Image: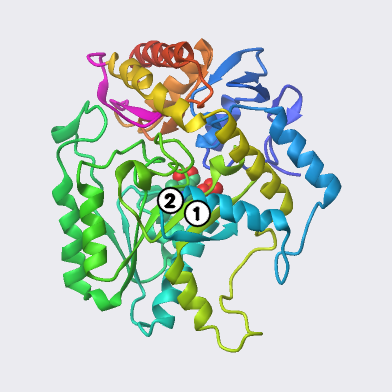
Amino acid sequence: MSGSNKTVNGVDMSAYWLPFTPNRYFHQHPKIMQSAKGAYYFDDHGRKLFDGLSGLWCSPLGHADPRIGAAISKQYEKMDYCPAFQMASEDTFRLATRVADMAPKGLNKVFFTNSGSEAVDTALKIAIGYHRVMGNASRIRMIGRDRAYHGVGMGGISVGGMVANRKMFASMMMPGVDHLPHTLNLSQMAFSKGMPTWGAHLADELEKIVALHDANTIAAVILEPVQGSTGVIVPPQGYLQKIREICTKHAILLIFDEVITGFGRLGANFGADRFGVVPDMITFAKAITNGVIPLGGVIVRDDIYDSIIANGGQEQAIEFFHGYTYSGHPIPMAAGHAVLDIFESDDLVNRARALEPVLENGLHAMKGKAGLLDIRNFGLSGAVELEPIAGKPGLRALKVLEACIERGALVRVAGDVIAVGPPFISEPKEVEFLCSVLGDAVDAAMKINS
Ligand SMILES: Cc1ncc(COP(=O)(O)O)c(C=O)c1O
């Protein structure tokens, strides 16, 4: 083993390469979580921390719900693994059916993956495969959006629009990708509650890209209905409808990446339901197992699946050469069933929706604080945008995170934006606590100028 001798609580930190983390800064300011229960984490300083982002948007039911643990352990005893190819467990079919039943009408086929990144790359492959079997092999271009996050696979970083996620890997990008502009414009929409009224016209940029390349070359548009990882960018009123219309007009598939927004975060099963816009595919992950065990997937319009299957050649031939060793793994399936049972029995989507005004009021009560450039929210998610420390992008938000931890809450840093998305099991007073901690943390962090 080589590297630094830095330790935390007597544990050597040098071997673990932390993902999406400033490792050098972390070694100086380690953040160690030791346990989690309900809506709280407990750290190595003995602090109880309200889980203001539901893990990484993935634990809306809070932590250590015994019903999920029991389902996993029962499944482990019954069958701990089933080969994913050429066979499946009954529970895998059942979970696919349950997910399809929650999805918008017409999207009834489910392909399981292990993560959101894999779900995205799978959806892009399905889009290309579909056009090919339909005799449109020229439709290979993809359209993403600036500031989009679609995971870290080759497809996902190519259609993604977060600059830092791409620049080191420029040589690995998929060819033939264009990006729509993102819709955040603080001069037009700062401090909007819910959907901004300005910006639907930005969807017309899609027509320009189509005109540039010809519709016959374009396979799909992929969008997060609300851009999550870049700091909760809420679509302008009418924007997603326009995108849908343009895609339909040009026979371009529309993929909603609902890895964050799926399963209740926007107060409906999917963002597609909340916005009243039905895409051709939906990617999901995270909340389907409450973050307890990895699982993702793609929900696909029936005729896309039907076309690929019908064009698969002889009956003994594989129709779609794609899949993972752990696709439909019985243990995440068991977790998924337990999570969906809890969603139903505890009426969690409605609980999330009922908390929306509490979060909205709590966040917007900060308006007027020094150094706040924007406050935005939609569903049970929100963000505050901070004036950066001159010459040190991202440091202000890190300082806010640390000030929140000192005061008893966890939030998420995205550049100089702080995002929040509390668990659906939160009590209103806990959401109010989160907002008040965040407000105090912003005040504290604004005093730092270098
Ligand atoms: C919209 C979206 N797509 C894809 C991903 C990637 O998911 P994963 O980290 O499970 O690969 C994320 C993760 O945050 C996401 O927010």
- Mark 1 CB near ligand 1 (8 Å cut): yes
In the displayed structure, would residue 323 be above or below residue 284?
A: below
Residue drawn at (54%, 58%), measured in percent from left and top?
A: 118
Q: Residues within 10 Å of mark 1 (few under 14, many from 20)?
A: some
Residue 39 versus residue 326 in the image, above or below: above
- Residue 152 at x, y percent in the picture: 50, 54
Report the side of 434 relative to 384 (left or right): right
* Depth order, front residue of 68/128: 68
Q: Residue furthest right?
A: 77
What amino acid type should be assigned to the residue bearing mark 1?
A: Val
- Return the residue nearer the eye: 63 or 406: 63
Q: Which mark is residue 397?
A: none
From the image, tell me which residue sits under label 2. 165
Q: Residue 395 location in percent, x, y?
A: 40, 28
Residue pictured at 49% horizontal, 70% vertical: 305
Camera sees residue 348:
yes
Q: Nearer the viewer, mark 1 or mark 2?
A: 1
Q: Residue at x 63, y 44 (%)?
A: 336
| Label 2 neighbour load within 10 Å: few <14, some 14-19, many 20+ | some
**Where is residue 345 drawn, in percent x and y?**
59, 31
- Specify the quadrant of the image occupied by residue 271: top left
Q: Is residue 264 above or below residue 256?
A: above
- Element under disc 1: loop
